[in-house]
Image: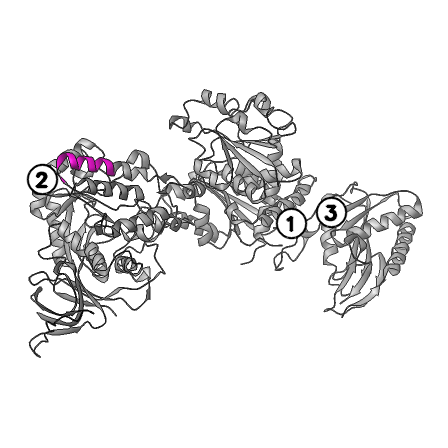
Amino acid sequence: MAKELLDKKDIERAITRMAHEIIEKNKGISSICLVGIQRGGVHIANRLRAKLKEIEGSDLPVGLLDISLYRDDLNVRKDQPVVRRTQVPCEINDQKVVLVDDVLFTGRSIRAAMDAIMDLGRPSAIQLAVLVDRGHRELPIKADFVGKNIPTSMNETVSVQLSEDGMEDRVVLE
Amino acid sequence: MNLRSKDLVSIKDLSAGEIEHIIETAAGFKDVLGRDIKKVPALRGKTTVNLFYEPSTRTRTSFEVAAKRLSTDVINIATSTSSVVKGETLLDTARTVLALGADIVVIRHKCSGTPHFLARNIDASVVNAGDGTNEHPTQALLDLFTMKENKGRIQGLEVAIVGDILHSRVAKSNIYALSKLGAKVRLIGPPTLVPDCMRDLGVGIYADMNAGLEGVDVIMMLRIQLERQGKGFFPSTHEYFRNWGLTAARVARAKDDAIIMHPGPMNRGIEIASEVADSSRSVILDQVTNGIAIRMAVLYLVSGVKE
Amino acid sequence: MKLFIKNAHLIDPVQKLDNICSILIEDRKIQEIHAQAAKGRGQGAKGSKDHKPGSVDEVIDARGMLVLPGLVDMHVHLREPGFEYKETIRTGTEAAVRGGVTSVCCMPNTNPVNDTPGITEFIIRKAIQEGSCSVFPIGAITKGQKGEELAELGMMFDAGCVAFSDDGRPVVDSMVMRRALEYSRIRNMLIISHAEDLSLAAGGVMNEGLLSVTMGLQGIPAQAEEIMISRDIALAELTGGRLHIAHVSTAGSVELLRAARKRGIAEITSETCPHYFSITEEAVSGYNANAKVNPPLRTKKDVEAIREGLRDGTIDVIATDHAPHHKDEKSGEFDAAPSGISGLETSIGLSMRLVDDGVLTIAGLVDKMTCAPARILGLSDTKGTLKPGADADLVIVDTEKEYTVNAADFRSKGKNTPFDGWRLKARPAVTIARGRIYRWE
C-alpha cells in the first residue's frame, strides 16, 4: 500500500527552502556549480537552479553525473546498471560543487559520486543537497541541505515522482 | 539491462536491442574519454588478455587502451613469440590463459570460428577481435556508432560498402548489424569479390560503382588485400582503382552530406584517392576514437553477465 | 560349430526371400535354409524345420527381429598401417560388427600407402589375426597415390585387392585415369573414383553457398564433384573399364549418373553415404568439426536428389566412408580439422529411416547395403546372401527399440560423428562373422 509523504506543494516548498539555505551557506551563488546525480538528481538539480535564478536573479551552471562506473556493487548486482551521460559544463578545479540527489539512503551512491567528481578535478568543497533523507546510513555521509527527513524501515522504498518524467509530483512510501 | 551472453563472438547473435544498448553505453564512455582523467574504476581487479594470433597494431592497441581505461590489468599475448609456435593447441593455450586469471579474453585469429570454439570451452568472457573472414563485431559496432553520431539514426540510411566483401569480416559484421537496425545496404565491387548469393541477405549488389553510389548517405570503403590480385580476383590494382576506387567524382554521386568511412589502414590510390581520404566528409579518424569507446562498452557489458 | 537360428524373418533379395525361416549353420557356412510361407501371403507352407535337440551347439531365437545377410561396406578407412592412433584393423572391425557389417573394404590411404602386394598381404594377415569380420583391401591406383604412375594392379589383385582407388585424392591427370581404366580390364578390376576437381575445391572446408559465405569458410562448389564425374564417365566410355563413383553427394552428380545409365554405359556403378541422405550443410553451424567431411554436406535439394537416386536405382550402393579421427584433431580450429565421419556404427540405423520414409523397401535397402556391393566386388558367391554354401555372415536387427546414439560408446576409436544424441531404431542385436557370435543387449 503506497502512502503519499509529500505532495506537489510540499515538494515546491522544500525546494524553495533548500535554495535559500544554499544561498545563505555559500553567501550567494556565484561560486557554486550544481551537479545532479543520474538519474534521480537531475530534475531536482534543474529545479533548484530555476529557483536559485528566481531568487538571486543570476544563473549558475548545472551538470549531469553518471556514477554507475564507480559503484561498489558492480560484482554483486544481478542487473547491470545502465551507463548514462556525464556532462559537467563547469570547471571542477577549485570550484564548490553541490551534488544533488533525490533520495539519500545508505550513502553509497554519494561515495561513488564523490569519486566520480574527483576524477573530473579537485573541487574546493563538495556539498550535498537531497530532497529526501530516509536514514539507514552505511557510510559516514551527511547531507548539507535536506528537503525532508523521513524515517523509514529497511524493507520500505521511497520513490520520488516528478512531472518531468510524466508523473504527478509526489514522494511515495511503499 | 544485461546482454544475454557472456561473450561477444558474432553480430549474428545480438538482437537489435542489444546493439542499440552497446552503442548507447559507448556514448557514456565517450564522455570519459573527453576528460583529463580518462579512467574509471568499473572493472578494477579484472584481467583482460589480448590473445592475438594475427598481427595487429590498431585493433590490439584499441582494445588495450579500452581495457586500461576501465582499470583492468592487461596482458598481451602475441602468439608469434609464444608457445603456440611450438605446436600448442588452441584449447591448451586458452586454458593456460585462464589459469593466469583472465576474466576476459580478446581473440583475433585467422581461422573463422575460433572465438566460438573458445567461448564454448572456457568460462571467461570471449570477445571476437576478428576471426578469419567471418566477423569483426566491434568494428561494426563502432561503425554504426559513428553513423549514428553523424546522421542521428541508423534506420532507413542508405549505406554502400565497397570492396572485397567476400573476404571482409568488417563488411559482413556491418551487413548483419545494419540490416538488424533497418538500414539499406548496397554492396559494390567486382563479381569475384561480391558473391551473388548475398542477395538473399536483402542487400543490393552493384558491379557499377557509379550506379551503386547514387544517393547514398554513407560510403564505407574496404581495404583491398594485395594478395588477392595474384589469385585472379582482379587483374591489377590499376584496373581495380579505375573501376572501384573512391574518387571525388564518385563521391559526388552520393548525397551532399554523405560521410566517408574506412576501417583502416588505407591503401591510398588503390581503393581511395588521397584527397578523398583527407576531405571534410571523411570520419575515418572519428572511427578510431569511437573504437575505444565501443570497446570499453563491450568489455564493461560482457563483464556484467553472470551465467 | 553347428548353429541353428529359428523364427528368423529373413530378407535375402538374392534368394528372393522375405519369409520366416530357420537357418542351419555349420563350420562358418550356411548349410540349410527352410522357409515358411511368405509373410502375409498364405501360400502352401514349405514348413519350418526345427532342429533335433542335441544336434546343434547353439540355438538363437530371432523372433520379432529381422535377419539380414551381413552388411558389406565397400568404403571404410581402417587407418592401419601408419595411423593407428585414429583406428586399427582390430578396432575398426569391432566397430563394423557392432554396426552389423561383416565385410569391409579398406581404402589404401594408409602410411605406407597400400600400393604393393606386400602391404596388401600385411593387411590381409592382420585382419585374419585380429579382425572381427572379413576385410578386403582396396589397392591404390597409382604409386603413393601420387596420381603419376600406375601401381602394380595385377599383382595386387592376385594378392587379394578387390578394387582400386586413390580415395582421399582424385586421379587428377586424365591420361593416368584413362590408362588405369584400360589396364584394369586384365582382370576385370573395379576402379573406384574419388571425384573431386582439386582446382575448384582448393582450400574448401564445406559446401559453397550463402552459409559458407556467412560463416567465413572457404566453400567447395557442387561442380567440383560433377566436373570429375563427367570426366570419369567419359573415360569409362572410352576405355570399357569398370568404374564406380565413390561418395556421391550432389543433385547434379545424380543427374549425370542417371543420364549415363540411360545411355547404356552399363559398367558404371556408384555409392552414397548415410550422411548425404540424412543431413545438410546446416550441420556445420557453430563450426561443428564433427560435420566436416569430404565431399561436404550439401543442401536440402541435394539430399532429396540423393534419396531419389537411391529410390530409382541410379545409385547402387550405400557405403559409410567410415573415416575415424582422433578427438584432438577434430577440436580447435575448423579449418585445421581433418575431414571425415566415423560411420560404421550409425549406418544401419540411419539407412533404415529410408524404409520408414518410403524411399526404399526393406529388400531394397538390403540390396544397397549388402547384395549390390557384394556383386560389384565379385564376392557374391560367398557374401551378400545367405544361400546354402555362402559364408555364415549375418546380422539380426532389432527394428523396434529406439536408442540414442552415444559416440563415447563407439567401438571405433573415432568418436567423430554429427549424429551424437540422435534417436534411431534398427540396431544389430546379434552379428555373426568369421565363426563368432557377437551379442549386443
In front: label 1 or label 2: 2
Q: What stretch is highlighted in magenta?
A: C229-241
Q: What colour scheme does the image use?
A: one colour
Q: Is disc 3 surrounded by few (<14), some (14 to 19) or many (20+) residues within 10 Å? A: some
- Going 25% across and 51% down the picture, which residue do you hit? C310
| Residue A39, magenta (yes or no) | no
- Going 14% across and 37% down the picture, which residue do you hit? C181
Q: Name the residue under label 2.
A: C185
Q: Name the residue under label 1.
A: B41
In the image, B257 versus B261, the foreground residue is B257
Secondary structure found at label 2:
helix
Q: Chain ID for label 1?
A: B
In front: label 3 or label 2: 2
Q: Mark 3 points at which residue?
A: A118
Residue C407 in the figure: left or right of residue B178:
left
Residue contact at pointers 3 and 2, CB within 8 angstroms: no
In the image, A113 versus C252, the foreground residue is C252
Magenta span dominant secondary structure: helix
